[in-house]
Image (tube, rainbow, N blue to C red):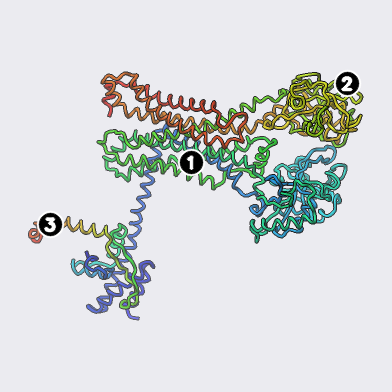
Amino acid sequence: MAIVRLEDGAYGATIRRDIEARTRRRLSISAVYTTLDRLEEKGLIRSWTGEPTPERGGRRRRHVALLPPGRRALRESYTAYSNMATGLEQRLKTL
Amino acid sequence: MSLLGVLLWLAGAALPRREREYMLGDLEEECARIQDERGTWAAAAWLLGESARNAARRAAQPIAALRSRQRGALLATDARQALRVMRKAPGFTAAVVVTLALGIGANTAIFSVVDALLFRPLPFPGAERLYAVRLASDKPDGVVAWPYPKYAAFAREQDAFDATAAYSPAVVTIDPGGRPLRAEAEVVTSSYFPLFGVHAAMGRVFTADEERLPARDAVVILGDALWRGSFDADPNVTRRTVTIKDRVYAIVGVLPPDFRGQSGTSELWLPVMMADHFMYKGAASASFGWWIRPVARLAPSVTEAAAVARMPALSERVGRIEPSRMKLATRNGRELFQLVPYRETKIDPAVGRSFMVLLGAVGFVLLIACANTANLLLGRALVRREEFAVRRALGASRGDIVRQVLAESVALSLVAGAAAIVVARWTIAWLTTAKPLNVTGFWSQYARTFDFFDVSLDPRITVFNFSVALGVGLLFGMLPARQAAGLELDQAPKRRAGDHLCSLLVVVQLAVSVAVLASAGLLVRSFANAASADLGFVPDGVVSMTISMQQRRPASFYRELRDRLRALPGLDAVALANGAPLGGGVNSGPIEIGGRDSRDGAVQAGINVVTPSFFETLGIRRLEGRGFSEDDTETAARVAIVSRTFADAAWPGQSAIGKQIRHGLRIAHGDAKGWTTVVGVVDDAVYGTLEEPRAPMLYLSAWQPLGTPAALSLAPDTIVVRPTSAAAAFSAVRAEVRALDPSSPVYDAATMADRVARVTSRYRYGSAMMSALALLALLLAGVGTYAVAGWTTARRTREIGIRMALGAQRRDVLGLVLGGGLALAAAGVALGLGVALAVSRLLGGMLFGVTPHDPLTFAAIAVVVGSIAAIASYLPARRATRVDPVAALRTD
């Protein structure tokens, strides 16, 4: 979802920040990359190394983007989740 | 450098190179943000924590690797499972392994031989650039042998080759001291050894100086076998000598054991200049002798096309220096050098063709083996459908089943591949030892080629072998695997696409076996024809051998020899002749017929000079008149006996007795113009090969010799005897000849039965190989048909049960099941006959007394294969009729 939100700006640091900010959960960069590696292995996302950027000491970024299977998987799991949650919004909040 | 800088550098150093760039970038970026928000220490703490987690992640990586290694464990499980399945079904396993092993093994062996024969380079340096240089003539092969001076001019003038040499085969009698022997020799230029990359194992090879003056340097080089056999492997042999034609030759070197000259059988090498001594005066110096064969190696900078383009100019240049005084050695009256790739001169195209046919046949058999294996695997998968269904029900995925079936097929084919190597080794050993004997015609080239090439199973072919096995396993494992994977427990056995595939495979198998069998049938008939061919004489119990006469001897010498042999115990009959049947041919010339034009009316005939008992000893039938008698001597009237073909050619429809002929050969008494009277006619005997048409033959009495004393080429130096024991006869006759003439060795001693075996060996070889293949093909096809018919019937048990319950008679059921099998058989046989008709034409050169489209053979084969197929489908059909309807309905 972070990748969807970040679109072109999706890479290790931004993804971590997005997740940390929204879930209020501490997350390490390496954990992000471990997950990304797995997703890539499953063919759900692809990643590539970009051009050197001046703002970070001229280092390259590893950009990531969703692949069609990734989109499908995300859509399916979101649909499933939201279908399951339909009608329970109030009760889930009070749990 | 700041604290954060140091930490970042350390963190970066700890990262694997692959991840360093982008990870470090992210770390730097985050560090800068945290430093801005919460200060340097917070950033440093975060960075340390981050690095620790990173290290932990990498430490965990082996666990991930372990997870992927589970896949390896799965493979091991599959392999174990496959082995267990193989053990549990030994019959099935044996069938597949034997089928594939025989198919692949035979294929590998024949492929090795064909590879060695047709594709492997000759064992000489730069072999692919070696060319035989011939003189173009009006015949496609050109003139092979040149006069030496012409070769020398060619070697001097040419500018396309970096090396040239010339050689000629020769047979010489050498005397290493007391015991003369005949040796196959090669007369060579000094450049011969460097050209073929041969170095002396001991001593030296010939020098250029020894190629300067005719008959000056009497030197000789021994082959390894001769050195060991006749010189007891004497390490000081280069200090010894041999005598050739009364002249002492110094032994200067010994060649390594793997080199046996261009013929593959040479054991002695002589310098070209000495031909003036041991051949005839002028052999090496005059331009009238045509005997030496040039070979040249193309210079690296010159292409074949460029060399060919240079030949006309070169031919003209050489022709001006050394003109060809022989019209036959020109094409359209012009001299032209012709380049023939050297390996082509080693391999007879007919041999190449017959081996391609054999390779095709083996390929066919491999096809049958594959089809059979596929059928067995398909059938087995169908039998095991329940097992697979249970596995599926218990949670095995489609992938698991496919993997398992594949593992089984691969394991099977690997075992079969290993067995195939054993089969291939045996087959090669058999092919090389059972090779046709060295006889005239193309098989001699073939046999020598084998000596030349040394066939063995090489790694490439072994790899090829395994790939075939694996390929078959994978390909035909895939089909049943896919089928099996699709099975569900509740699926009722239905007719599936696999059945059609199996039927098709059966048709293909039958067709292929018909094609191979038809070829084999033709070859077997050829062999039978050759073996039972009328030779015109009775070979049983006859032994012959030839004396290598070193000087002319008068008739009295041969008479004494004959009398001494007659006195030997254990010899029932003794005769002398200039040539014996199956001895490789005799002299021939035009024979003038009395009362006819001397030129146009002459009969070209072979000439044999024989003692009176010759015809009786060999059992050659007398058709008319009388044989020679002891009284037909120099003082009596000149008489001759002719063969049936001669009589038919000279005096068709008349008796030959009393007719006059004139052979034009100088005789001891009277002049060559004198007429000779025909006193008898005998049956035609085979002198050369079975294939050549019977030539007219003129027999003259040995006691009325040609020339005084008889010319060596017409001397009755071949001994024909009927001994009680062949082995005893060989040594007794040898001893007697040595006692009479110690300088003349006896050679070519063999029983007539051996000689018959030699002339028929090509047919025996061809038919034996093809028959073995054909039987294999038939067996495989029969088993394949039986298997398919068997399990198709088994699966129709229920249907048959219902039919019988509804009142079908056994006959109906039999017809139903048998009809299906016979339809397949008919299709297979028809297809096979078509293929066989197309293929058998290629066998032309290997057939004897039978046409490639022999209807009898084809009909017989069709009947045999048809019957086998019928039996193969009858057995399960009969079983089907015994089905108890009630039991049948209960199945499945």
Can see residue A18?
yes
Helix, strand or loop status at disc 2: loop
Task: Find out whether the residues at labels 2 and 1 contact each other: C-beta distance under 8 Å.
Answer: no
Q: Residue at the bottom extreme?
A: B1
Measured in 3D between alpha carbons, the distance from the residue under mark 3 to the one under mark 1, in whole angstroms, is 61 Å
Bin the neighbour count of mark 1 within 10 Å (Cα to Cα): few under 14, some 14-19, many 20 and up: many
Q: Amino acid at mark 1?
A: Gly
Picture coordinates of residue B805, whole percent (x, y): 26, 20
Q: Are marks 3 and 1 on the same chain?
A: no
Can see residue B732?
no
Q: Which residue is mark 3?
A: A85
Q: Amino acid at mark 3?
A: Ala
Helix, strand or loop status at disc 3: helix
Near-viewer residue (B465 or B367): B367
* Chain letter behind tag 2: B
Q: Which residue is mark 1?
A: B417
- Which residue appears at 82% of the width and 23% of the height? B659
Q: Which residue is mark 2?
A: B631
